[in-house]
Amino acid sequence: MAVLPIAKLGNPVLRKIASPVVQEVIATSAFQQLIDDMFETMGENDGIGLAAPQVSRSEQLVVMGCEEDSGFPNTVLINPKIVFYGPEQVEMWEGCLSVDGLRGKVTRPSAIRVEALDRYGQVLDFEATGLYGVCIQHEMDHLLGKMFLDRMTDLSTLTQLKEFDSYWKEESAAVI
Ligand code: K2U
Ligand code: ZN
């Protein structure tokens, strides 16, 4: 396994629309190695999600995992699509492993339904809410060349991490 370098804001790879993964590629050892390396890279950087463009691979692949949240299973999404957005919105503080030292408030649908392939090429079709649902939307934005900064509706909430920890960390996610 390997910890891969993470592309940072300004790297053009983060602004490309990622290519679909060809089904036959999924089972190759190289692609399975990429999945394992992305999990290691995510963990090493204290992330709960990581999209392939963030390791300079413009492919529709996302890995996620959050041990602290029982409703947030270890997940691999290949060629994911959001097929339904719920009516309620949730506002949450977001950050990004490709945007060092910043947090900002983003409002997103609080419930989604996702179709994708898993790491074995099997079809996934599930609903997601809470931090898990927000993370999926954040990661799928990366596949579209979007960053959480693009989704902020109130740039006055853009905060440096130290100031976030000092003044805002206690704020919980608000369903609006
Ligand atoms: O994709 C990434 O850059 C990893 C993101 C995933 C994420 C961001 C916002 C909300 C949910 C997931 C994070 O850096 S992982 C660390 C994190 C987690 C929750 C909130 C902010 C930052
Ligand atoms: Zn991100």
Image (cartoon, rainbow, N blue to C red):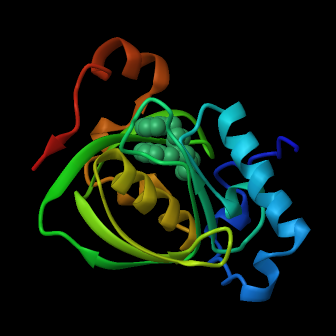
Give the camera-side residue of 174 and 163. 174
Q: Toward which corner of the image does residue 82 lie, by quadrant?
A: bottom left
Q: Is residue 10 above or below residue 96?
A: below
Residue at the image position 27 percent from the left and 78 percent from the top: 84
Residue at the image position 20 percent from the left and 51 percent from the top: 90
Q: Relative to residue 147, is residue 173 drawn left or right?
A: left
Could you tell me if residue 7 is visible in this image? Answer: no
- How many marks on residues? 0
Q: Residue furthest top?
A: 166
Residue at the image position 80 percent from the left and 49 percent from the top: 37
**Residue 132 position in % (x across, y down):** 38, 50
Q: Is residue 1 above or below residue 54?
A: above
**Residue 96 position in % (x across, y down):** 54, 44
Q: Relative to residue 157, is residue 148 drawn left or right?
A: right
Q: Is residue 79 above or below residue 145?
A: below
Q: Toward which corner of the image does residue 100 lie, by quadrant?
A: top right
Give the camera-side residue of 59 and 168. 59
Residue at the image position 42 percent from the left and 45 percent from the top: 72
Could you tell me if residue 154 is visible in this image? Answer: yes
**Residue 56 position in % (x across, y down):** 78, 61
Give the camera-side residue of 81 and 158. 81
Give the camera-side residue of 4 and 144. 4
**Residue 160 position in % (x across, y down):** 46, 27
Q: Quadrant for the N terminus, please.
A: top right
Q: Is residue 118 above or below residue 91?
A: below
Q: Relative to residue 149, is residue 176 drawn left or right?
A: left
